[in-house]
Amino acid sequence: RTNLVAVGGSVVGSEAGRGRRISGGERKRLAIGCELVAEAGSGCLFLDEPTSGLDSFQALRVMETLQGLAATGLTVVLSLHQPSGALLSQCDQLLLLASGGRTVFQGPPGTVGEYFSEVQARVSLPRRSGSLVSDIEWALEVSSVDQTSAAAVVASEKVVQGLSESWTEANAVPHTPPSAAVGTGVATLPRGAWQWIRAWRCLAWRAWKQAAASPVLLVMRLVANLVTACIFGAIFFQLPNTTVSIPGRKGLANVLCNFASMTSMVKTLGVFRSEAVIVERERSQGLIPIAAYYSSKVLAELPLALLSVGLLGGLTFALTHPTEATEASCVPGIPKGGVFLAVLVLQWQVGTALGLFLGAALPTVDAALEIGKMVTMV
C-alpha cells in the first residue's frame, strides 16, 4: 500500500541517521506505513507535513500514496507547508490557512479559482502573475504575507485580513449550545492476542537479523571465547577430584559465570542504547508491546548464546575435567557437562536481561556499565 516492496529488505539505520539505505521519499512512506499499523482499526490517518524536505518528484510520490490510501476508504488528514499546486490538486478537500491560522478558503481544490474570483470584487487582490499555472498557486500567493519590504507587508496583510473576513462572513454558523449526547459514537477495534503474537514475531525476526547482521563480528566473538576457554583450560587444567581442588573449581565456576554474564550484558547494552530512541518512539505509537520487545530480544539471543557458550563451556570443561573422573552428576539423568553448559547459558541470558533492564532504567551506557558490573559481581 505504500510502494515499499522494492526496499523491503533494506536497512533503515539508527535514530542518528547512520546506515540509511533508502531515499527521503521512501523514509516518508515508511513513516506513513508505521502510522497505518499504529492506527489500525481507527479509519483515520493524521500526518504533519509529510512532504517537507522532499523534492517535487518524491513529494508527488508521497501524495500519490496518500491518495491511494484515501481511495480505500481511509480518512487522511494532513498539513502541507508551502505546497505546489500539483500537490494540492490531489486533495479532495482543502483548508487554506494564512498567517496566524486565519481561514481564507475551505472546499474542493477545483473551486478555488471560482471562489477567489468572487472575492476579488470585495477585496483588492493583486493581479494574477503570468507565471502561475493554476488557480491554487494564485490563491497561495495572495494568501501569503509578502516580507520583501515594510510597505509590502502592510499591503499583503491587508489583503489576507480581507480574505479572512470575507470567508468568515460567508460561512458564519450560528452558535448552538452543546446538547447532551448519548455515548461518543466512537468504535474501536480491540487488540487481541493475535496482534500481540504478530508483533512478537516481527520483533523476534528483527532482533535475530540485528544479532546476526555482522558475520565478522560473530566470528570475532567466537574466537574470543575460544581463546578465553584455552586460557581457563591452561590455568585449571585437569583439576583432580580431591578436596584440595575445591577452591580451584569454585574459582573456575566464578570466573566463567562472571565472564558469560558480563559479556552478554555489555553486548546488549551497546545494541540497546543505539535503538532505545527508536523503540520508545514505536512503543509510544502503539506499534509494539513492551513485554513482546523484551521477551523477543532475550529469545533471539538464545541461538547465539548456545553457540558461544557451547564453545566456551565445552572446551573449558574438556580441558579442566579429568578424563578418568566417574563421580555422579548433581542432576540425575543429565551428564555433568550438560549441567555445566546449562548454568552458563542461563548466566548468559541473565546478563542479556540485565543489560536490557539497565539500558532502559539508566540514562547513559557508562552508568549502566558501572551498576551492571556491581550487580554481576555481587
Image (cartoon, grey):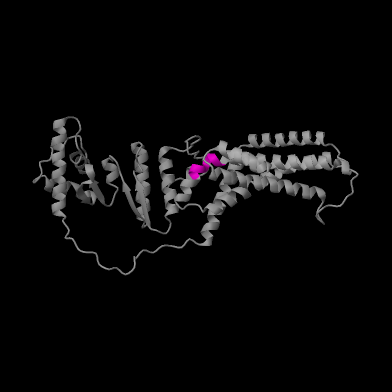
Please identify the residue farthest to the left as the structure is shown: 121
Q: Residue 160, how many percent across, how many down?
A: 16, 42
Query: Is residue 175 placed above or below 165 in the rendered structure?
Result: below
Q: Residue 130, how many percent across, how many down?
A: 17, 35
Please identify the residue farthest to the bottom as the structure is shown: 182
Please identify the residue farthest to the right as the structure is shown: 324
Label tally: 0
Q: Residue at x 51, y 54 (%)?
A: 289
Q: Residue at x 77, y 47 (%)?
A: 340
Could you tell whether 171 is left or right of 232 in the image?
Answer: left
Could you tell whether 159 is left or right of 7 in the image?
Answer: left
Could you tell whether 88 is left or right of 44 in the image?
Answer: left
Query: Is residue 76 placed above or below 257 in the rendered structure?
Result: below
Q: In the figure, residue 263 lies in which quadrant?
A: top right
Q: Residue 35, how many percent across, how many down?
A: 42, 50
Q: In the figure, residue 222 lies in which quadrant?
A: top right
Q: Which residues are magenta?
A: 272-278
Could you tell whether 37 is left or right of 141 in the image?
Answer: right
Of residues 364 and 178, the one nearer the viewer is 364
Residue 108 visible in rendering: yes
Magenta: main secondary structure equals helix
Of residues 125 and 242, the one nearer the viewer is 242
Residue 1 visible in rendering: no
Q: Residue 36, how many percent across, how many down?
A: 42, 52
Q: Residue at x 31, y 70 (%)?
A: 182
**Quarter in which the C terminus is drawn:** top right
Q: Can residue 277 be found in the magenta stretch?
A: yes
Query: Is residue 117 placed above or below 153 in the rendered structure?
Result: below
Of residues 371 and 176, the one nearer the viewer is 371
Query: Is residue 332 placed above or below 245 in the rendered structure?
Result: below
